[in-house]
Image (cartoon, helix red, strand yellow):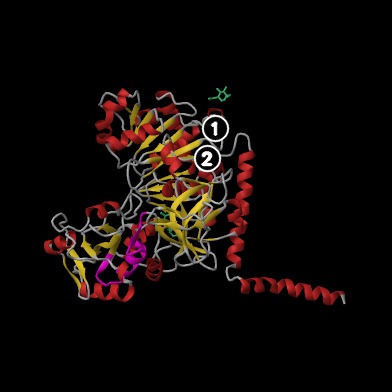
Amino acid sequence: MIALILYTALTGLAILPLLLYLRNPYFFQDLRYTISMIQIGVWMSKFKKQKPFYSILDRFLDQVARQPHKKFILFEESSYTYSEADKESSKVARALSSYAQLKEGDTVALFLGNEPQFVWIWLALTKLGCTASLLNSNIRSKSLLHCFSCCEAKVLVAGADQRGAVEEVLPTLSQQGARVFILSEDSGVEGIESLSDKIRQASDQPLSPQLRANVTMKSPALYIYTSGTTGLPKAAIINHERLWMASFVQSLAAVRSDDIIYVYLPLYHSSGFLMGLCGAIEKGITVVLRRKFSASHFWNDCRKYNVTVFQYIGEILRYLCNTPKRDNDRDHKVRLAVGNGIRADIWADFVQRFGDVSICECYGATEGNIGFVNYCGKVGALGKEHFLHKMGCPYALIRYDTEEEEPVKDSRGFCIEVPRGETGLLVTKIGERTPFTGYAKNNQQTEKKKLRDVFVKGDLYFNSGDLLKMDNEGFIFFQDRIGDTFRWKGENVATTEVADHLLMVDCVEEANVYGVKVPGHEGRIGMAALKLKENMDFDDKAAYQHVKNYLPSYARPRFIRVQEALVVTGTFKQMKAKLAEEGFNPAVIRDPLFYLEDNKGYVPMTQEIFSSIAEGRLRL
Ligand SMILES: *[C@@H]1O[C@H](CO)[C@@H](O)[C@H](O)[C@H]1NC(C)=O
Ligand SMILES: *[C@@H]1O[C@H](CO)[C@@H](O)[C@H](O)[C@H]1NC(C)=O
């Protein structure tokens, strides 16, 4: 009898996973994700309890002790072990502390591109308890001065090739009493001090943790700049807690301790720095660092350095798919790509062409207080709803009016959560575990990201600015960024959706869709900037057939502008605002322009058509 009961119980246990799997095909992925999250939660509370708290620098130093001879950074023809990186950064810390008199709590602006020194200087500043402000190495003059001052930096450290940009703003910097160092053996200019010689002469002895004893989990670790669509960049405050959370994305994406990660995204942005570099330190893996992205060198680099994981963002995977096919396309060791912004069509193309690469799409903003990870590899999704995650970071998708550019309110004045399957604005509760640290010295922009009285009087949410949609299985899909949707004839048009259709037209290599204003009409009408495939002309018939077959009339691009290259931001996102402003006037725009004539197709845009529209003789 007992044997029978035992037997039944055991069989029950054995088939339990099968039953669970049948009920939920993502059961095992959900389980793995749950375990990872619990683990991270346990680690975080341990790190916080330690006195002083356990920082990413402490993790780095532990990795140095555990695996001193493991390669940490591979860059061009050089390589540096964990131990070498530690010594280099101690030298930098000693040089900066004696010559710039840095002390705990000071902010230092870094102004250089991707190179190992970037990493040493950041580690050095962390060893001294200082905050690093990561300036975009492409900014100049007014922007540079703005970014330097808005985090109250006292010292600027610039790369050797940034000399021109620094000299341009030197008078103002000197006036403000800023100290300026350049990574070179000699300076030759008054007001700029050389740093490389001082680093070379400094001792590589470890620095006392006492120097950073007052830093806490909530102290700013970094300032990272986010470019708005308008105005000057804003400095997002990244504290140590936020830095840790971003570093764990690699663990959630199942990066292993024997992986080699390729980091070519700029280190002054959060993807490259937090998810890439800090994530690698958290796992103790090797980083292959590159100055900047190059589609033509990409796979050769992966082969040369035995890369197994890389990061992507925005349009990067499309650029890779657009390179000419080669016989050795599948000859590489890459097994995982982690990033954000891949579109469903490219996902399929990429895997088909470059082989068995898992794609782990993630979602998060530099200044945001929430992230998602598509741990199931569901094509097109950026994440999946998970009860533990939702408990930790309460969020909602709320109904949004794209014309008024504000959330829709119910009769009591509260926001309305959208049902599954409907697009809504992602808002996340601001709380103890999900703080929003805001922007340095920019209260106005910080306040603009906050939503009050969302579901009850007195609550406070972070406005992500992203329109997302959740399906019945809980998968979350990116729909649009606020401002990237336009409204025409009373209908909302998602620019990404139209772009996806244009990309199916044979001659189109890249497409950027936006809405333009038309005199005498409400809303904005669709327009697309296209980059054509090499040696191909704009096939007006194929384009017309396609948009006519697949898009409702209000979503069809009325104007098409053919460009040599489409403009992207530093994070490889398409720029729309400027194009929308330029409109469709053939007298102003030099690029070939086409107009969609009703029941006819795309015809070359003429001054006559333009005048008819402008004067209201031609209604659209
Ligand atoms: C750390 O904080 C203590 C107490 O507030 C203070 O006395 C000390 O000077 C601080 N140390 C540094 C390096 O700022
Ligand atoms: C890459 O792997 C191969 C074979 O495992 C090895 O011979 C080579 O040295 C590795 N290259 C680098 C840069 O580590």
The image quadrant where one finds the N terminus is bottom right
Q: Give the camera-side residue of 279 and 286.
A: 279
Q: How many marks?
A: 2
Give the Cα distance between marks 1 and 2. 9 Å
Mark 1 residue crowding within 10 angstroms, few (<14) / some (14–19) / many (20+): many
* Label 1 lies in ligand 1 vicinity (Cβ under 8 Å): no
Residue 600 seen in this snapshot: yes
Residue at the front extreme of this rendering: 411
Residue 169 is left or right of residue 135, and the answer is left
Q: Give the camera-side residue of 181 and 75.
A: 181
* Label 2 lies in ligand 1 vicinity (Cβ under 8 Å): no
Residue 22 locus on image (x, y percent): 62, 74
Write down the residue under mark 2: 240
Amino acid under label 2? His
- The span shown in magenta is 483-509
Q: Ligand 1 is in which quadrant of the figure? A: top right
> Is label 2 in a helix, a strand or a loop?
helix
Q: Quadrant of residue 473?
A: bottom right
Q: On residue 215, which mark appears?
A: 1
Residue 252 locus on image (x, y percent): 54, 56
Instruction: Classify 227 as above or below 588.
Output: above
